[in-house]
Image (spheres, rainbow, N blue to C red):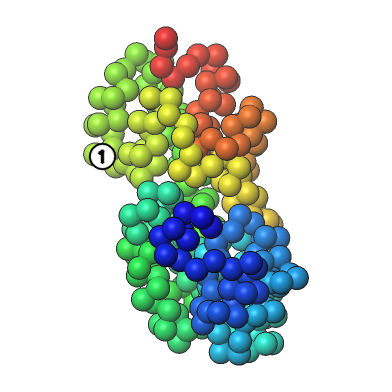
Amino acid sequence: MAPLLELGAEGAASPKEVAERSDVVVTMLSDSPDVEAVVLGPLGVIEGARAGGLVIDMSTISPEVTRRVASVLGERGVDMLDAPVSGGEVGARDATLSIMVGGSRSRFLEAEPIFRAMGKRVMYMGESGMGQAAKLCNQVICAINIQAVCEGLMLGASFGLDLGKLLEVVTAGAAGSWQLSNLGPKMVSRDFTPGFRVRHQLKDVRLALEAAADLSLPLPVLGLVQQLFRVAEREGLGDAGTQALVVCLEKMVGRGLVQP
């Protein structure tokens, strides 16, 4: 908390204490068990929240867990919005995140100014858990798209193309995407600094596949990409940015994207 305290924020010793001193509590954590522990566990938010209070969870977690946590809070008269985000570290720093919100529409409208302070596009998606559902759809597209970027660049490298020129022309066409524009150059420059970590993407892919299994929905390409991200994690790249997925393809091909 030290850097925030230096900027004038007030500290607290537990989530319970935060809730006791707040009308709205915002959480953004790594996985479903973390949210359950912070919100419902010992000295958790639920122990300090007052009836009429609001919990906004901006983590990416299971929609089922979201609905369960919201139900328990609801028994105490506390509402919950699930509001996962997309946009990475840059979006958080620049307040340009996309925010997908589930829960009570009236509480969403009440909290909208909070979301507008953090995000550029804020969308109400429906009842509890629907924000998380939308985020998992986002993560499916991101995970598959990053592999497409890896393969397209590797093909270009194998042809002997200038990858800088390739990126410039392809990003302006139908193949353009956020992943290509932002992570493609990092692959070429070997910059694996995390904006979004491999291990977090792997967690989100797992959540999407679990949800798909509950819906009896096949997601065959996502299943393949999950295995590739798992290889990246086993290669010691769990804390690298998701653009490090290109390393797995390089090992399979037996050559680097950029030759020394």
Question: How many numbered dots are placed on residues in this image?
Answer: 1
In the displayed structure, 135 sits above or below 171; it is: below
Return the residue nearer the eye: 27 or 68.
27
Q: What element carries label 1?
A: loop
Residue 20 appears in the figure: yes
| Label 1 crowd (10 A; few <14 / some 14-19 / many >=20) | few
Identify the residue at image location x=47%, y=84%. Answer: 107
Q: Position of residue 58 (x, y in %)?
A: 52, 64
Q: Is residue 63 left or right of residue 125?
A: right
Return the residue nearer the eye: 40 or 196.
40
Q: Which amino acid does label 1 sit on?
A: Gly
Q: In which quarter of the image is residue 189?
A: top left
Q: In which quarter of the image is the C terminus?
A: top left
Q: Where is residue 41 in the image (x, y as percent from the top left)?
A: 74, 70
The residue sitting at the top extreme is: 260
Q: In which quarter of the image is residue 157?
A: top left
Q: Is residue 5 left or right of residue 66?
A: left
Q: Is residue 64 left or right of residue 57?
A: right
In the displayed structure, 102 sits above or below 235; it is: below
Q: Where is residue 180 in the image (x, y as percent from the top left)?
A: 36, 38
Residue 205 appears in the figure: no
The residue to which callout 1 is attached is 173
Return the residue nearer the eye: 243 or 13.
13
Return the residue nearer the eye: 205 or 72.
72
Q: Where is residue 94 in the image (x, y as percent from the top left)?
A: 33, 55
